[in-house]
Image (spheres, helix red, strand yellow):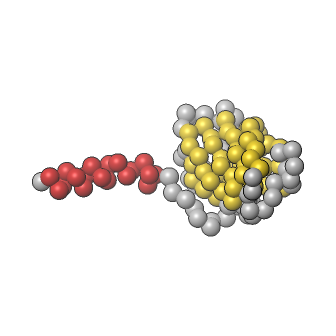
Amino acid sequence: MLKLIAIAGALLLSGPALAQHAHGNQKGPNGGPMEDVAGVHAELLVSGPSLTVRIFDEAGKPVDTTGFTGSAMIVAGNDRKTLQLTPSKEALSGQATAPIPSGAAVTFVVKTISGKSGQAKFTTP
């Protein structure tokens, strides 16, 4: 009986960890890496100094980001920058002061309009 309770407890505690899963090498509809975060799918797109995170629901349809807040910490070598991201239609976006290099680590932090929050880690293509 004690073993059954321990197993049930372990399953209950692991539930939140299983609820957000990484897409791994999955590409989003625009060709960027995609991760699950805060109940939505986030696709990272980088072009020069521009960083955009497109947001999709579980069915892959774009989500209106009005009311979302977000930031991105970009680490490339010894250089660290944090960008505040602005919601615009189905994305959150920001501008760095210099082009974002390939291979940079990006930690995306988001809070949705429904109050869910989370973070996803990406590597720029």
The residue most toward the bottom is 25
Can residue 62 be seen at all in this image of the molecule?
no
Q: Residue at x 75, y 41 (%)?
A: 83
Q: As rendered, which of 83 and 39 lies closer to the eye?
A: 83
Q: Is residue 116 left or right of residue 42?
A: left
Q: As rendered, which of 108 and 80 lies closer to the eye?
A: 80
Give x and y (percent) for residue 115: 55, 33
Q: How many marks?
A: 0
Q: As rendered, which of 44 and 124 lies closer to the eye?
A: 124
Q: Residue at x 22, y 52 (%)?
A: 6
Q: As rendered, which of 80 and 40 lies closer to the eye?
A: 80
Q: Residue at x 19, y 51 (%)?
A: 5
Q: Is residue 95 above or below residue 113?
A: below
Give x and y (percent) for residue 32: 72, 61
Residue 97 image-quadrant placement: top right
The C terminus sits in image quarter: bottom right
Q: Is residue 51 left or right of residue 105?
A: right
Q: Is residue 77 left or right of residue 110?
A: right
The N terminus sits in image quarter: bottom left
The residue most toward the left is 1
Q: Residue at x 43, y 55 (%)?
A: 18
Give x and y (percent) for residue 70: 67, 39
Give x and y (percent) for residue 113: 60, 34
